[in-house]
Image (spheres, rainbow, N blue to C red):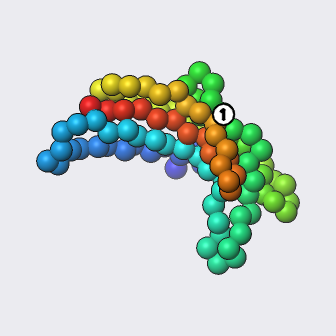
Amino acid sequence: MRISNLGCQRITFEPLNFSGTIRVIAGLDFAVLHEDQGRMYWEAVRCGEQNGNTAILGRTVQTKNRLFSGFRLEATDVVEDAAATGATHAMGALSAGSFCLA
């Protein structure tokens, strides 16, 4: 790993006996329960989208250490491009983007 603070992911969809449109929603979420403790150790400080980049800033509940994460969705054969949104839900904050593929 040449750049330790950068992670990349490529996801490929290949239809097997399927034709139609699929909606892909990708997001970042700090509302994750610790499996053993049954509680969350992160809280979302801020999330949102700007110029096609989706991002979230979180911090640990006790030490207040901060973590920033962001992503950009790129796809071919997009039939509908939905704007990325920052949305709150009952257990924290979610920053997500979506698109439809044919």
Q: Residue furthest front?
A: 90
The residue at the point 67 percent across, 44 percent down is 88
Which residue is disc 1 drawn over? 48
Query: In x, y percent, where is residue 70?
Result: 61, 38
Q: Residue furthest right?
A: 63
Query: In x, y percent, where is residue 55?
Result: 64, 37
Q: Is residue 50 above or below residue 67?
A: above
The residue tagged with tag 1: helix, strand or loop?
strand
> Quadrant of the rendered structure where residue 84 is?
top right
Query: In x, y percent, where is residue 101?
Result: 32, 33
Q: Residue 26 versus residue 12: which sits nearer the camera? A: 26
> Quadrant of the rendered structure where residue 11 is?
top left
Q: Amino acid at mark 1?
A: Gly
Q: Split into 4 quadrants, where in the image is the C terminus?
A: top left
Q: Residue 78 versus residue 76: which sits nearer the camera? A: 78
Q: Is residue 81 above or below residue 94?
A: above
Residue 55 visible in the snapshot:
no
Numbered disc total: 1
Q: Residue furthest bottom?
A: 36
Q: Residue 8 versus residue 60: which sits nearer the camera? A: 60
Residue 90 visible in the snapshot:
yes
Query: In x, y percent, where is residue 32?
Result: 63, 61
The residue at the point 69 percent across, 38 percent down is 47
> Quadrant of the rendered structure where residue 75 is?
top left
